[in-house]
Image (cartoon, rainbow, N blue to C red):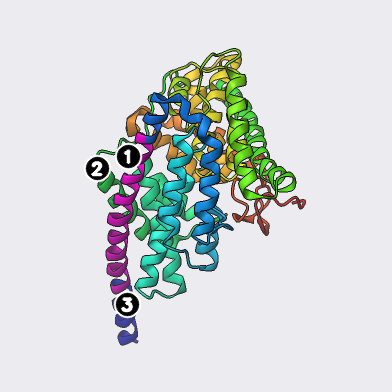
Amino acid sequence: MHTGKHRLMWEHACGFLKWLLFAAIIGVVVGCVSSAFYHALLWVTAAREGHPWLLALLPAAGIAIVGLYRVCGLEKDRGTNFVLTAVRENEPMRLRTAPLVFLSTAITHLFGGSSGREGAILQIGGSISSTIGQWMRLDDKDSRIITLCGMAAAFSALFGTPLTSALFAMEVVSVGVFYYAAIVPCVVASLIGLRMAQSFRVTPTAFQLTGIPDMSLSVLVRVLILGILFAGLSILFCRVMHLAGRLYQRYLPNAYVRAAAGGGLVILLTMLVWIWAPFTFDYNGAGGGVIQAAVSGTARPEAFLLKILFTAVTLGAGFKGGEIVPSFFVGATFGCTAAPLLGLSPSFGAGLGMVCVFCGVTNCPMTSLLLALELFAGGSYGLFTGQSLVLFALCIAVSYTLSGYSGLYSEQKIVYSKFRPVFIDRKANEDEAD
């Protein structure tokens, strides 16, 4: 008996040390690549802002992206959905995915498409770590964990949110089930990825909120109302994203025509915006400046609707990037506009909107709570008293519950009902009754 216990302890110790080593390797490699991706997006964004005429080439850029994916044999690429499938079903990812999505996302941002960066970085991190796992000849269980490590390290390096990144990788694949076996590897990979990003001068994503109210019954009611509104906004965001893709597929089945038409529509939408805001490019690219302005208390009331439209037109046509940063934009601008109507600070409303719409579209409430801690006040947890954190927790909980089974990722599994302790095990966006 003692021999069996000693053998088990030895196996656990070896497994622990093995994952420390593997996670460190993933953190270093993925952290370096993610840092390069960050600086590439900074460069292309600056180039686009300095040369607005580049927007006219967006249709040609879309055609080039489609051509690149066909040449590389990835014309049926499913984006972030493939990363989720790789973890849950242990489908191997190809290394060529990383440079391809790196380049195509940079092209999208350079020529003015509306997209984020997290979809690309999750694919980059997942494909690199999955390939390293194949080189190491890991079994199917370990291969899943090492893919999660890559996701965590990449997200952490790009956004500067290590706790959020580790938990997001563990929570997003199957809602209601945490991949606890990956907790040490994901945390270690996330921290090392962050350290590598810091060494390459990657600026973390952080905001300073103002006007966080003291907790009272009146404030709780108003925050609850905002949570209901953010849940509805999350549903709208997801449905418009998926609807745009289906409409493109139905009416423009040729991928080259679809990309060119999508680029043309973005140009047309940009010119329409100029009617009331001449030469404004707020809805092209990721829109980081608008998010910052909203958190500071200023946002146009129509901004959230326009960003949804621009992003759906861009990504539905086949351009690359992600939806999470656009969801930050949508949540921040809507919250900044809606909060004052309820007597709350626009800055506080923008902060709530960012994390609650993120929660509604990803179905990740625990990740969203950590995101609030790491995003605001430059990562200083001192901003939040216990009471103010409760306000974020309430709004996130309401948004998660009432957003139903909508989600950005069609391959995301909803394992348990949001309303009862019932096992349902279905994919996000399925229309079955609970």
Q: Where is residue 109 in the image (x, y as percent from the top left)?
A: 46, 36
Is 324 in front, or is 180?
324
Look at mark 1 in the image and give the residue it sits on. 39
Look at mark 2 in the image and give the residue it sits on. 200
Quadrant of image for the N terminus: bottom left
What residue appears at the point 65 percent right and 48 percent down from the top-left corner? 418
Q: Which amino acid type is marked by label 1? A: His
Q: Does the magenta stretch include residue 26?
A: yes
Decide if residue 218 is in sight here.
no
What residue appears at the point 42 percent right and 29 percent down from the top-left corner? 48
Q: Residue 11 carries which label?
A: 3
> Which residue is situated farthest in the right direction here?
433
**Corner quadrant of residue 182:** bottom left
Horizontal placement of 391 versus 124: left or right?
A: right
Establish if 368 lies above or below 410. above
| Helix, strand or loop under label 1 | helix
Q: Position of residue 27 (x, y in %)?
A: 31, 55
Is 409 in front, or is 394?
409
Magenta extent: 14-43
Q: Which is closer to the viewer, label 2 or label 3?
A: 2
Establish if 175 lies above or below 258. below
**Inter-mark Cα distance, 3 to 1:** 42 Å
Q: Which is closer to the viewer, label 3 or label 1?
A: 1
Q: Residue 277 carries which label?
A: none
Q: Position of residue 57 (x, y in %)?
A: 51, 34
